[in-house]
Amino acid sequence: MLQDSPPQSEPLKTPESTPAPSTLDKPQDSYVKLAMRNMVRKSGTSLRHFALTTVGLLAALISLAYIFR
């Protein structure tokens, strides 16, 4: 049959409550710092997306100005 385990004096530590050793040594980087590092690493892709966004926004604004003149 099933036997009950003896009561434990200490609560079990789960992976969520125990911080990883690497996070104890240095603070976690901010989102902005990680985004800037990613932009520098992938500069070609970032510049292409920036150019497409700029062209698309200008096209939308010029189209709206032409329609509602």
Image: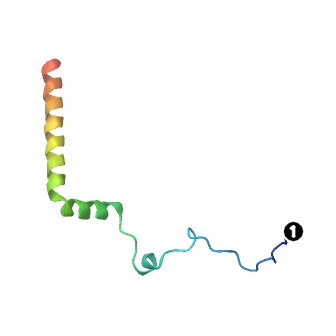
Q: Quadrant of residue 64?
A: top left
Residue that lies at the very extreme toward the front in this rendered image? 1
Going 17% across and 30% down the picture, which residue do you hit?
61
- The N terminus - image quarter: bottom right
Q: Nearer the viewer, residue 16 or 28?
A: 16
Seen in the picture, residue 34 relative to 59 is either above or below; the reply is below
The quadrant of the picture occupied by the C terminus is top left
Q: Is residue 12 left or right of residue 63?
A: right
Residue 6 position in % (x across, y down): 82, 78
Q: Which residue is mark 1?
A: 1
Percent position (x, y) of residue 15? 56, 70
| For residue 34, side relative to residue 63 (left or right) | right
Q: With respect to residue 41, does 60 lie above or below?
A: above
Which element carries disc 1, helix, strand or loop? loop
Residue drawn at (25%, 64%) of the image: 37
Q: Is residue 42 above or below residue 62?
A: below
Image quarter of residue 55? top left
Horizontal side of 69 relative to 3 (left or right) equals left
Q: How many marks?
A: 1
Q: Amino acid at mark 1?
A: Met
Which residue occupies 42% across, 78% down?
22
